[in-house]
Amino acid sequence: QVQLVESGGGLVQPGGSLRLSCSAHGSIFSINSMAWYRQAPGKQRELVAVISNGGVAHYADSVRSRFTISRDYAQNTVYLQMDSLKVEDTAVYYCNADVSPWGHYLGQGTQVTVSS
């Protein structure tokens, strides 16, 4: 029905930047919210940022002022611009989309590693 395709992960030094992308493909009537989650080794998955259909964004306290979530509504794509990366940002990052009329979908994940 719906596939989420993520890209943009990789290895970066502390203080560096990365931009993640996630595009939704398939039988999509509309997309409500889109979000990014992450899961570090040995930890639970956590919400990083979410953006509503109206463009209202919310961030986890740990990334506020460093990460920016945005959307391209025409392309059904969500981005996560990550600046001033820290070692503790290392995790697998997952895209989530609330797709009408089907419900929530999760991407396959992309690895972000912050290391010197």
Image: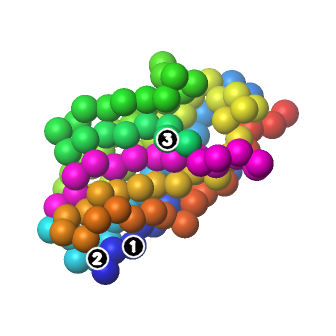
* Rendered view: 46 above or below 104: above
Q: Position of residue 66 (x, y in %)?
A: 52, 23
Q: Nearer the viewer, residue 33 or 68?
A: 33
Q: Which residue is mark 3?
A: 47
Q: Is residue 12 visible?
A: no
Q: Which residue is mark 1?
A: 3
Kindly report the secondary structure that dominates the magenta region of the rendered protein.
strand
Q: Nearer the viewer, residue 99 or 80?
A: 99
> Which quarter of the image is occupied by the C terminus?
top right
The quarter of the picture where residue 96 lies is: bottom left
Q: Position of residue 25 (x, y in %)?
A: 32, 71
Residue visible at 48% across and 19% down in the picture: 65
- Disc 1 residue type? Gln
Q: Which residue is mark 2?
A: 26
- Disc 2 residue type? Gly
Q: Which mark is residue 114?
A: none
Q: Is residue 86 visible?
A: yes
Badge 1: few (under 14), some or many (20 or more) residues near its Cα, within 10 Å?
some
